[in-house]
Amino acid sequence: MGTLIDRLIALDKTIFLLINGTWPSPALDIGMAFVTLFGNGLFLAGIVGPVLYFGDRRRFAARVPAIIAAVVVGGVVNGIIKEIAGRPRPLTEFSEEIRTGAVWVHTVFERWRGNSFPSGHAQTAFGTATALAYYYRGWYAPLVFILAGGVAVSRIYLGVHFPLDVVAGALLGVGCSLGTCRAWEKTRTRYTRPKKKTDP
């Protein structure tokens, strides 16, 4: 089992270096720095909130709290796992190789050195996308997942997460949002269901 995990981590590092070390360009730096903002909860709230308010005002009060709860639950679980796993970020993981010049990690603005696994940005992006798709299943639903995928890739490109970090964050976001939205709707239905009239 240890050997399998070691191979998986080695592959994870190889893929990271392939993306982070061979893709960089000035244009991608700007694009990825912008895309990664969609993994920030406050930035997303500032966009999604007004869009839902003006686009679906009738159901805004019923649905937005569930979407917020879904992302928050995922964030709490993500934070707990991140503290338990304690995986270092790429700059720390490759610190010795960077010092000797064997490895170069491309970064743009952010030079984070805290815990890496799982990715909070990927969890937030995919958690939001899942919650939105749960309530709004129109043609635009796949677009929010494409954008979430862009956020995940941007975290690798920007040098702050390994591929396994963003995959785990994405799965966590999807799972927590689905579970929270379903639980929210069951609870809401239970307490808002009209009472049956009884004969006098």
Image: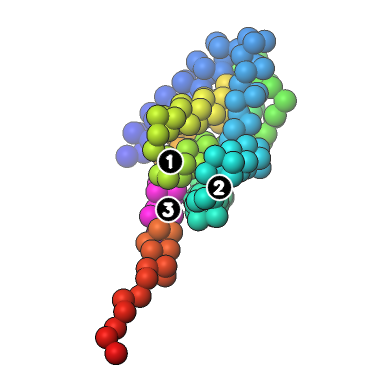
* Callout 2 amino acid: Arg
Per the image, the residue denoted by label 3 is 181
Q: Nearer the viewer, residue 97 or 30?
A: 30
- Residue that protrudes farthest toward the front in the picture: 200
Q: Secondary structure at mark 3?
A: helix
3 or 2: mark nearer the eye: 2
State which tag comes first along the sequence, 1 or 2: 2
Q: Quadrant of the C terminus?
A: bottom left
Identify the disc placed on residue 169.
none
Q: Quadrant of the N terminus?
A: top left
Q: Which residues are magenta?
A: 174-183
Q: Quadrant of residue 171?
A: top left
**Residue occupying image coordinates x 31% and y 79%:** 197
Per the image, the residue denoted by label 1 is 136
Is 117 one of the magenta-colored residues? no
| Residue 89 is at least partly visible in this image | no
Q: Are marks 1 and 2 in contact (CB under 8 Å)?
A: no
Q: Are marks 3 and 2 in contact (CB under 8 Å)?
A: no
Q: Are marks 3 and 1 in contact (CB under 8 Å)?
A: no
Identify the disc placed on residue 57.
2
Separation of marks 3 and 1 at Cα, in angstroms: 12 Å
Q: Nearer the viewer, residue 171 or 4?
A: 171
Q: Position of residue 20 (x, y in %)?
A: 56, 18
Answer few, some or many: residues within 10 Å of disc 2's Cα (few below 14, many 20 plus, some between 14 and 19): few
3 or 1: mark nearer the eye: 1
Q: Position of residue 175 (x, y in %)?
A: 40, 46
1 or 2: mark nearer the eye: 2
Question: Please, what is the dominant secondary structure of the magenta stretch?
Answer: helix
